[in-house]
Amino acid sequence: MGDGCSSRLYDNILYVGGSGPGNYTSIQEAINDAVDGDTIFVYSGVYHEDIIINKSISLIGEDKDTIIIYNSSRGFFHEEVIHVISNNVVISGFTVENIMDYGRGVKLDGVENCRIGNTCIRDNGYGISLVDSTNCGIIDNIVIRNYQEGISVDTSTSCIVVGNLVKDNEEGIYITSSSSCIISSNLVYKNSYGIELISSYNCSITSNTIIEGGVFLHGSSIEQLITHRIDTNTVNGKPVYYLKNINNESISSIDVGEVILVNCSDLEIGNIDISDATVGIEILYSSGVDIVDTYLNYSSVDIYYSDRIGIYNSKILGNGRDSVSFYHSDNNSIYNTIILGGSYGISFTSSMRNSIRNCDIHSNRYTCVAFSQSSENSMYKCVMTNDAECIMLFSYSIRNSFKSCRISSRYSFGVYLEDFSDGNKFYRCNISDSLYGVFLGLSHDNKFLENNFIGNLEDVYFYNSFLNTWFRNYWSNWIGLLPKPLKGCIYTDFDINLHIPVINFDWHPARKPYDIGGGMEYG
C-alpha cells in the first residue's frame, strides 16, 4: 500500500492492486485519499471490502470479468458492498457480489448525476438500488441472481435504466414512487416479475425485451397511471398492448405478449393465448371489459379498481401468484372458466357483488377461492378440489353465498371462515373428502342448509363462533333420526390454551344425500 502521495503516478489517478510502486491494496483507502474529480483505477483481483464513496470520483475497473468486490463482513443483514453518498460518481468495470446476503450490491443514496455502467452485479439480496436520487444512470450492466430486486429506483427523479441484462432476479426492474424515469432497451430475462412500475409519474418504458416475465403497473390513482408512456416492448417475442383512455375496442385473435388496460371501457379481449407473462392481463380503473375464449398459461389476470369485468369460457393456468385477483373491484363475473395452478385460484380483496358461476378451480397451492374484507359475492355450480383450503373467508368477509358447489380438500379445510366472517350462506353444496369439512373461527350467524357432508375426517369444528345455523344437512357418518352433534369450543384464555367444549346441532339431518348437480368438466 502506498502513502497517498507516492500512489499518484499521474495528477488525478490513484491505482489499486497491480504491481506498480505505491499502489493501494484497498479500494477504500484509495477513496479516503482521493479528492473530488480524481479517478481510481483498480487492477484485476478479488477485493474483500465494503466501500463508501463520499467524494465525486470515478471508480474504474480494469476488467469486470476479473475484478470481484465481495462484502467483507459476510453478515446476514449486511447493508451494501458499494454505498454511494456523493454526487457525480462514476462506477465502471467491476463484479460486485454479496453471496445472497439480504443487503445490496450497489446503493446510490440521495445523490445526483451518478452513473453505473459496464458492471456485473450478482448474488446479492438487492442488486442496484437508487434511493432519493436525481439524474442518475444505470447503463449497460449485467444484473443477475439477486434475491429480490435486480434494479430498483425508489423516490427518484429523471433517472435512466438503459441497455442492461437483468436475469434470474425476483423482481427484474422495480420503479416505485418515482417520476420522469426512462426504462429502455433492457433485456429482462427469466425474472419472476419483469418490469414493475408502482405509484410513479411520467415514466417511459420503451423497447424492452422481456422473456418469461412482463410489465406490472400499479398506482393509487388514474392520474398516476395515465401519465406513463409504455410502447414497443415485447414479452416472449410478442408485443405488449398498453391501452389507456380507450373505449369500444376489441383485442381479438392476435399475437400478444401481455395486455394492460388503464381507464378503458367497453372492450373485449377475445381468443388470444398468453404464456409466461407473470401478469398476462392487467385491468386498472376500467369498466365493461370482457375476456372471452382466452388461454393464459403461467400468467395471471389482475383487476384493480374496476367494475363489470367478465371472464368467460377461458382457461387460466397460474404461476405461483393468484391466478385471478380482484382488488377494490365490484360487480364482476367469471363464468365457465377453468382456473388452476396459482397460490390462490381467485382472490377478492375489498370487493363486492362479484359472481363466479360454473367454474372449475383446482390444484392451487393455498386456496381455490379467498375472500378478504369482501362481501355479497356469490358462487354457483362451481367445482373446487385442492390439497389445501378450497374456500377461505377472513377479515370481515360477510354475506357471501355459495350454492350447488362441489368442495373437496384432501389435506385441509373444505370451507374455512375466520376473523368475523359473518352472515355467509352455504346451500346445497357437496363438502367431501376433506380433513375438515368446515372450520369456523370467530365467525357468526352463518347458515349451512341442505349440504352433503361426505367422507370428511371431521365434518365440522368451530371455536368462539356463535349463532351459526345447521339445517337439514346430510352427514355420511350419521345414521338415524336423532340430531347430529357438531363439536366446537370457547377459548377463554389463549395464553394457557384454556377452552370449554361446546356442541351445536343439526336438529333435522337429512337421511339421504341431495342431488347437487352443477360443475363443469375440464380437460
Image (cartoon, rainbow, N blue to C red):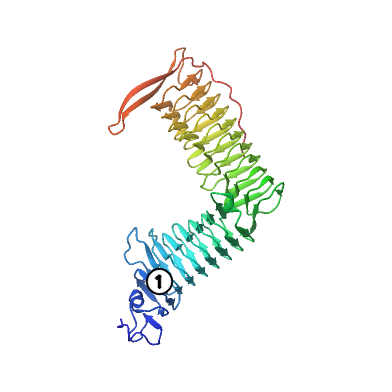
Q: Nearer the viewer, residue 86 or 373?
A: 86
- On the image, numbered disc 1 is attached to which residue? 68
For residue 386, above or below residue 477: below
Residue 342, how many percent across, how many down? 52, 44
Q: Nearer the viewer, residue 405 or 55?
A: 55
> Which structural element holds mark 1?
strand
Q: Nearer the viewer, residue 395 or 484?
A: 395
Residue 470, how many percent across, how many down? 48, 20
For residue 502, above or below residue 35: above
Quadrant of the snapshot with the N terminus: bottom left
The residue at 51%/32% (across/down) is 408
Q: How many marks?
A: 1
Quadrant of the snapshot with the C terminus: top right
Residue lying furthest top: 481
For residue 296, above or below residue 438: below
Residue 434, how many percent across, how many down? 47, 31
Amino acid type indicated by mark 1: Ile
Can the viewer see residue 27 in this picture? yes
Can the viewer see residue 276 in this picture? no
The residue at 36%/70% (across/down) is 51
Residue lying furthest left: 496
Q: Residues within 10 Å of mark 1 (few under 14, many from 20)?
A: many
The residue at 58%/66% (across/down) is 185
Quadrant housing residue 195: bottom right
Residue 146, how many percent across, how many down? 45, 60
